[in-house]
Image (cartoon, rainbow, N blue to C red):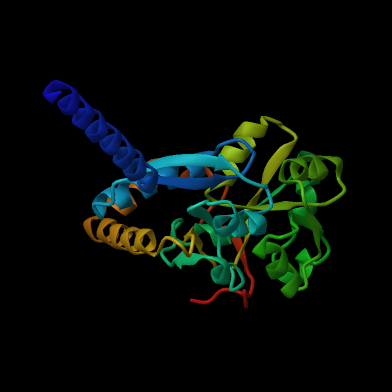
Amino acid sequence: MTSYFSSLISLLAFISYALYSDKVAAQNTLTIAQEPRAVYQRDEYLKALLQQALAAANYSAKLKTVIVHPHQQRALIALEDNGVDLYWSMTSPERETLAIAIKVPLFKGYIGKRALVTKQESLSRFATVSTAEQLKGFTAIQGHDWPDTKILAHNDLPVRPFANYQAMFNIVLTGRVDYFPRSFIEVTSELKEKNNEGLVIVPNLYISYPSAFYYFVAKHKPELAKSLEQGLAIMQKNGSFDQLFAQYFADDLKALPFDSANTVEIKLENPYFQH
């Protein structure tokens, strides 16, 4: 009997430990929203930065990526609806009501600097453009739910909203629109992935507007938001934030076709960005 009860106690202890371990594992697994598209260098950077920031704040967690709807607004809503814990996105006042915005510019302001992707045959048309007024003679394409679409429209720049991100590059190639503004930290890896010589960056001309790209944390994870903010602050202070950014983007930024002596920057207003 003693042996029986001893075995029973051991079994119950094992079951309790297993259930506890599963519960802890579930608590320490963070689900990250990922759009159904190619994974670019910027995505790898954001995940590496997230891991380092959490480690700096002593927040132990396993990261799990889940595929969500490609529309950014719906992805943010999914933070509450589908048990997703975290998403990264360009910010807007509306988006900051849907989740907890960690207000650390993850791309150091480069998300608001936009190279103009056009087709090779159209390059000459941009040669004399140097003002926003002149750019009004061209039509851009942007995501229908992107903050950028509203920004261009606010500045009276013709813009065609479109739902399919992957198709936007092809629409440029067919000439149905004139250009596709892409951020400095996105454009190089995107064009490499497309591998189409017909798509080029307009040299010595870009548009810019104040903006930021943030981590957004689900409202049911306030402790995660606090730890992430603390970890990023530590990384900014000790220099590891800048080091990681340079590791991923320094070469691409230097390779952009912009001569500092001749490049024209067309500055736009962004009334949707709260500093």
Q: Is residue 99 above or below residue 140?
A: below
Q: Quadrant of the N terminus?
A: top left
Query: On the rendered structure, is 44 left or right of 156?
Result: left
The image quadrant that residue 173 belongs to is: top right
Residue 77 shown left or right of residue 171 in the figure: left
- Expressed as whole percent of the image width and height from the top left, the position of residue 7 reads 19, 24
Residue 143 drawn at (x, y percent)? 72, 55
**Residue 17 x/y as whole percent:** 26, 37
Q: Position of residue 136 (x, y in %)?
A: 80, 67
Q: Can residue 171 be spotted in the picture?
A: yes
Residue 87 against residue 11 in the figure, above or below:
below
Residue 261 visible from this viewpoint? no
The outermost residue toward the front is 1
Q: Is residue 97 left or right of residue 109?
A: right
Residue displayed at 76% across by 64% down: 135
Towards the viewer: 148 or 117: 148
Tell me the residue at 50%/43% (across/down).
Answer: 43
Q: Is 19 in front, or is 122?
A: 19
Q: Quadrant of residue 174?
A: top right
**Residue 196 in the figure: left or right of residue 41:** right
Nearer to me, 65 or 136:
65
